[in-house]
Image (cartoon, rainbow, N blue to C red):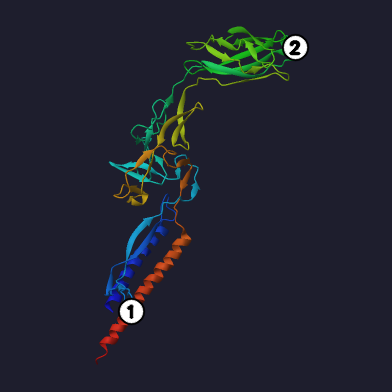
Amino acid sequence: MLRSMFSAISGLRAHQTKLDVTGNNIANVNTVGFKSSQTVFEDTLSQVVRNGSAATAQTGGTNPAQVGLGVKVAGITTNFEQGSTQNTGRSTDFMISGDGFFVTRAGNEQLYTRAGSMNYDSAGHLVTPDGALLQGWTAANGVVDTNGAIGTITVPFGDVMAPTRTQNGAVVGNLSSGAAAGATSAVQSQLTVYDALGTAQQLTLKLTKTGANQWDVVTSDASGGTQTTSLAFSTAAGSEGRPTAGQTVTFTPSTGTWPGPITIDLGAVRQFGGASSLTPGEVDGNAMGTLQSIALSGDGTVMGVYSNNLREPIGKLALATFANPGGLAKAGNSSYRVGDNSGQPAIGAPGTGGRGSLTAGALEMSNVDLAEEFTGLIVAQRGFQANSRVITSSDEVLQDLVNLKR
């Protein structure tokens, strides 16, 4: 009788733990990056009432008779399956698609989390809601070295991008092979270029047909400085309409700060039938710019968006993977720390070494399945009730024994 009561007591304890775990899962159904847990039961020791015996030539073998002594919680496992995606539109909300954890630092401790809701602090650091500092690699002169040590990611708002002067430009398009020579064939294109101080200047290229396959190229700036060159096109089979001479124009503007000339490439201009049309090609150089905001790419690179419409890497977020994520110890605030059975973190760039990619403007929500949790809640409740009934029944049997003698 007593064995059944103690077995039922162990069942009450085990099912109470299952209720606690299930209740915690339901409580965190809307927690960003939360991973649900499951309770695993196993039986405890058994008392042998009769030992088994092996078969002999005259008798058959018998199985042992064993009475179980109850149940215990074998473990509480964490389900690291991907949670659902919630789009937020915030540039500092990051979601990991795949394996990996964000690396953060709280004081002198390095922690790991799947919750990607970040904010800026007063120093421009990216921090979690509880103030842990997001870790990664900081760019030097626009280059990120992921082979170095990780550190705190800082967004230097107000940072100034120095101007660079234009050294190369290009014009692309078509000059009509059927155009008549003279002023009526003139075609213009304008390039925006920058001097050494980042001041924008306009260069004008005016092309006028002077012969069957010859065009004059007049390059001028806003102050009236001009330079005339000649552009010739081929008529040879296989290269018809392609430049043969004058494919580049070297021009130094007469205003602004120009420590050197600008080379304008006309190699992509063609002379085919049809209308004449020229457009500016790629032009290097830029004006001064100040950092306005950030954007995140799938490989974890944090791009700074500047007021001059240019982008430059500020840093790259680091992700950590573990041989056994289930061995991580929960540290609170949706964070984990290295556990005895988790293995050491393998830290690297997103999208490498089995690590997931990143998405900005979205969050990974809890992976709690409410239908499954409520079903588990009912199972745990009924299991608790059944074990309570075992105690009641055992008590009634003991009461009958006591009442044998009156």
Query: Is residue 102 shown left or right of residue 310?
Result: left
Q: Position of residue 297 (x, y in %)?
A: 47, 36
Q: Quadrant of residue 350?
A: top left
In the image, residue 247 sits, relative to residue 385, either above or below, namely above
**Residue 327 numbered tag:** none
Residue placed furthest toward the front: 57
Q: Position of residue 168 (x, y in %)?
A: 53, 16
- Residue 78 seen by the camera: yes
Amino acid under label 1? Answer: Thr
Q: Which residue is mark 2?
A: 180
Secondary structure beneath dot 1 equals helix
Q: Residues within 10 Å of mark 2 (few under 14, many from 20)?
A: some
Assign the C terminus to one quadrant of the image.
Answer: bottom left
Looking at the image, is mark 2 or mark 1 earlier in the sequence? 2
Q: Residue at 34% across / 80% down in the picture? A: 393
For this rendering, which residue is in front, 103 or 53?
53
Q: Residue at 62% across / 13% down in the picture? A: 205
Q: Which residue is mark 1?
A: 392
> Disc 2 vs disc 1: Cβ atoms closer than 8 Å?
no
- Residue 133 seen by the camera: no
Query: Is residue 330 shown left or right of residue 240?
Result: left
Secondary structure beneath dot 2 equals loop
In the image, residue 43 sits, relative to residue 206, either above or below, namely below
For this rendering, which residue is in front, 13 or 363?
13
